[in-house]
Image (spheres, grey):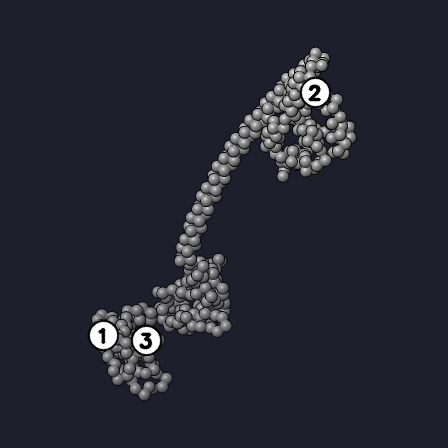
Amino acid sequence: MFRTMPPALRVFDLSGGIRYYSSGTRQIVEYQNPAGKILRDTVSLQYLCKKRKLGFDHIRLLPPDRILINTEEGFSVLRLDRIRENSERKGFAPLIRHVYLTGAADSLVFSSFCQSHSPHPLVLSPKNNSLRFEFASPSFGLDDEWDKTCYMLENYDKNGWMTHLAGSRAKEYTKLQPGKYVFRIRNSFGESSIPVIVSPPWYETTLAYFAYALAALVLLSAATLAVDRISKKRAEKKARQIEETRLKQQMKKDLEEKANDLAASTLEVLHKNEIIRKIHNSLNDLTPYLSGDKDGEQILQTLRVSIQMGIEDNDVWKRFQSNFDIVHSGFLSQLEKQFPELNQTERRICVYLKMGLRSKEMAPLLNMTYKSVEMTRYRIRKKMGISRSDNLASLLDRISRESRLE
């Protein structure tokens, strides 16, 4: 029972043939099996050596099969039924003795001498995700049990149970992903296990996902507001376009009215000048009848001058020119800018050509003969540097387009 006798030893005789030995190095319980054979458990109580203080021992039997043992921290209860049961067993399940974090320096995170199942999981940070499990077999004298020992890390070993390697008492796993695992080891007599939880990094935690959801909600709200603003701007833009279209249509209508007024005033001038020209010709027919009558000739001359002034009156032309520039976007200004050598009569012919009038229609408006209008058109071509084969109306259309661009 003792290789060397301890310096101090206390023996407690309990009822039922039970005896308890207490020293600084060993804690032993002695009992009888049903056959009357005396048995001793010298292993299960070793952990009590450091928890008891010699000289203050107090051990008491609690019928039918409990032993109450005092310790520095309180009391421990020894179950004799379990001890008797274990004494009849041929072997025990393997024990997970130690668990280390592996890395630059190993760090012990779990240690056990008797528990086959850990009630609390090992919770590890994302960086400490490499482990080494060390295990032992308490089945003394049954070395062949190692050949029957298998291990597995649930949620990691896809092939299930792995056969234990001869001569090895540890298994290492590196770079475990966040999640829940259970390390299991078993033999013919039972199984031991310890749960392990590798925590996810902060950006994969529930709080992080909540923050992501909140951020997504904020972004969605911002996107909704942005879409609303864009829709509002589009609606405003569409409203402006509609208003611009309406204004353009109104402007076009106003221009058409101006053009109609311009055409009406032109026809009015044409009709007036035609009547005045007829009157002027009629006055010329009266000249032979007033020969020698100085007063009559004086009156006739005065009428001729008045008629001529009426035909050449510039007020109608100024009004006409103003309306024409409004309708044709500064055509006359552009014409004068490109061809400053054109005189007023030549510019008026250009305007009438732009309106689509022919030489015969221009003659009474200008108080000129048809031939004079044709000669003036020839001079216009010469000043503009175009040949007789070139279309003068096309050149005037180009000038009109340039005036609109400016």
Pick the quarter of the image with the C terminus: top right
Label 3: which secondary element: loop
Distance CA(mark 2)–CA(mark 3): 138 Å
Residue shown at the point (49%, 70%) measured from the top left: 103
Spatial CA span between label 1 and label 3: 16 Å
Report if residue 390 is visible in the image.
no
Distance between mark 1 and mark 2 Cα atoms? 146 Å
Residue carrying label 1: 61
Query: Marks 3 and 1: in contact by CB < 8 Å?
Result: no
> Within the image, what quadrant is residue 38 found in?
bottom left
The residue located at (22%, 70%) in the rendering is 64
Q: At label 2, which amino acid type do we have?
A: Lys
Q: Which amino acid, by three-letter code, is at mark 3?
A: Leu
Q: Label 3: which residue?
A: 45
Residue placed at 40% from the left, 73% from the top?
Answer: 140
Q: Which residue is mark 2?
A: 360
Q: Nearer the viewer, residue 41 or 247?
A: 247
Secondary element under disc 1, as helix, strand or loop, is strand
Which residue is rendered at x = 67% and y = 19% of the image? Answer: 298
Depth check, mark 2 against mark 3: the one in front is 2
Q: Quadrant of the N terminus?
A: bottom left
Report x, y in % for residue 253: 54, 28
Of helix, strand and loop, which one carries label 2?
Answer: helix
Which kind of residue does numbered mark 1 sit on?
Leu
**Residue 179 relative to residue 89: left or right:** right
Q: Which is nearer the N-term, disc 2 or disc 3?
A: 3
In the visual, does 38 lie left or right of 142? left
Q: Position of residue 339 (x, y in %)?
A: 71, 36
Is disc 3 surrounded by few (<14), some (14 to 19) or many (20+) residues within 10 Å? some
Is 129 in front, or is 79? 129
